[in-house]
Structures are given as C-alpha cells and as structure tokens.
Amino acid sequence: MADPVAGIAGSAAKSVRPFRSSEAYVEAMKEDLAEWLNALYGLGLPSGGDGFLTGLATGTTLCQHANAVTEAARALATARPARGVAFQAHSVAPGSFMARDNVATFIGWCRTELGVPEVLMFETEDLVLRKNEKSVVLCLLEVARRGARLGLLAPRLVQFEQEIERELRAAPPAPHAPTAEEDAPETATTEGAPARGPRMTPSDLRNLDELVREILGYCTCPDQFPMIKVSEGKYRVGDSSLLIFVRVLRSHVMVRVGGGWDTLEHYLDKHDPCRCSSSGQCP
C-alpha cells in the first residue's frame, strides 16, 4: 500500500517546482477559487494555467455571483450590497463587447456596492486579456470573504482564515509574541448567518509538519532558517518571536501573512537570508 505521507509530500514538491515561487501562491489561490465556484454553481472551471481566467472571461459567472451575494445580504437585512447587477447571460463570447461589459459591470459592483478596497481591485483588461491575473485573484478572494460573512459558501482559504481568527480570539498571543495576523482584516462569518451550500472541509493537518520539514530541507545550508513548531499549524520563525499560521491547501503549503496568503516556499525566499540573497527577493 502506498505511503499517504509520501504521496502528499511528493505532490507538494510538484506543486511548487513547475513555477517560480513568486507564481506558486497565485496558482494555489486559482485552484481554490475554481473549486469554490464549481461547488457554488456546478461549473467545470479548470484550476490550472490560463483555464480558470478563461472560464471567467465572459463575466457571466462573476455577475451571477454578485447577484447571489446581494440576495444573501437582503435575506439578512444588511445594508451592503443593496443592489445586484443586470448582465448578458447567454451567447457571450470571451473578448466580445458583451463580455467586457459584463466584467466592467462586476468591477463596478465590487467598488460601489461591496466596497472592495481599490488596492484589491482589477481592471477589465486584467481578466479579458489576462494582463494581471494576480489582481483578479486577490479581488475574487476578497469578494468571497464578503460573501462568507453573509453565510455563503467560502473557499478553503477563507475557511482557514475564519479558523485562525477563532483560534486568535480563543487564545490571544502574548504581547511579546506578535503574529503575522496582526494587520489581518476580520473575516468571521456574520453572527447568525446561515451556512449556504455544501461545506468544504479544511484539509487535515496531521501531515503538515512533514511537509514543512520537506520544504525547509530544500535549503542545504549548515545552519537552516529557524522554523519551530509551537502548536498544530503554528510556527515561530527566524530569530524573532514572530508567529505564523500554516495550512495545507491540497498540494500546497500556505502561510497566512497580513491580510492574505503566500506559499511557504515563497515566504522563505523572502525571509530566509540564505534563500532571499540568492533569489534577490530580500525585503
């Protein structure tokens, strides 16, 4: 019988190595968002490469989701978003005028109705012409957070955020032990909001430490960057008392940083003096 730990560890290595570490976290978020939208709307969006953005390029799914979030807000009598969108739902070709209009409509709804911060917004060309997939992905993740507060199904990354928020509230860190979550926005579901749609169960953490050790092992320096396990999914990094939260997202090892996520390998590329000096990513 195949060793499940070895299988997961091998997948983790494969998930990062085809990409530069700076690209891997975007790929991980695309996979998560594709699974989330497929579960919500019965779609068949591919999760890898350009397929995910290509599947959204008509703007129809985005506008459909805007209206779903608006309906959830009305059901809970919340102030925002107050209005949904009118859009072209049929016979829309990617790159066409109707597709661009749908995408622009969704972007306008995010700004005016949902109040998504400008730093998390994207432009029509970013999606239609795939000019900036990172901006598209970050915006969709923020839209998912807002919907989760209204009881809509959340992507796994947002579920992880809610889990971490609960952990932080239950056991606040000591003043001398800052965490990478200190500037993170509140992501918990609105009190009393009913869960809508199927629940996506977060990944099991039992093999997390093995995956963390494998990624740390990519560095062959005599003195490796310190990353000490404090509790399940929580590590102290470097020579400081900074605590980070780590989760497994399918075959990716993800780190919660500020208000977002990164892959562990890219995080180490930026913070491990040995790795960042060789990759030119030192902060």
Image (cartoon, rainbow, N blue to C red):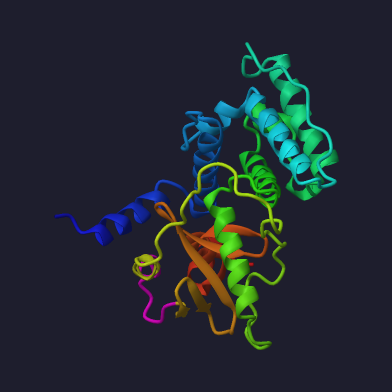
Circle count: 0
Q: Dividing the image into 4 quarters, which one contains the N terminus?
A: bottom left
- Image point 27% across, 55% down: which residue? 7
- Image point 78% across, 22% down: which residue? 86
Residue 145 visible, this angle: yes
Q: Is residue 168 left or right of residue 191?
A: left
Extreme residue in the left direction: 1
Residue 281 visible, this angle: no
Dominant secondary structure of the magenta stretch? loop
Q: Position of residue 202 (x, y in %)?
A: 47, 56
- Image point 48% across, 67% down: which residue? 275
Q: Is residue 46 left or right of residue 116?
A: left
Q: Position of residue 260 (x, y in %)?
A: 63, 58
Between 73 and 163, the one nearer to me in the picture: 73
Give yes or no for residue 65 being in the magenta stretch: no
Q: Is residue 162 left or right of residue 208?
A: right
Q: Position of residue 126 (x, y in %)?
A: 68, 33
Choose top left, top right, bottom left or bottom right for residue 196: top right
Q: Is residue 258 left or right of residue 29?
A: right
Q: Which residues are magenta?
A: 215-224
Q: Dividing the image into 4 quarters, which one contains the C terminus?
A: bottom right
Extreme residue in the top direction: 91
Where 160 sits versus 55, above or below?
below
Choose top left, top right, bottom left or bottom right for residue 85: top right
Q: Position of residue 133 (x, y in %)?
A: 62, 39
Between 9 and 187, the one nearer to me in the picture: 187
Between 155 and 239, the one nearer to me in the picture: 155
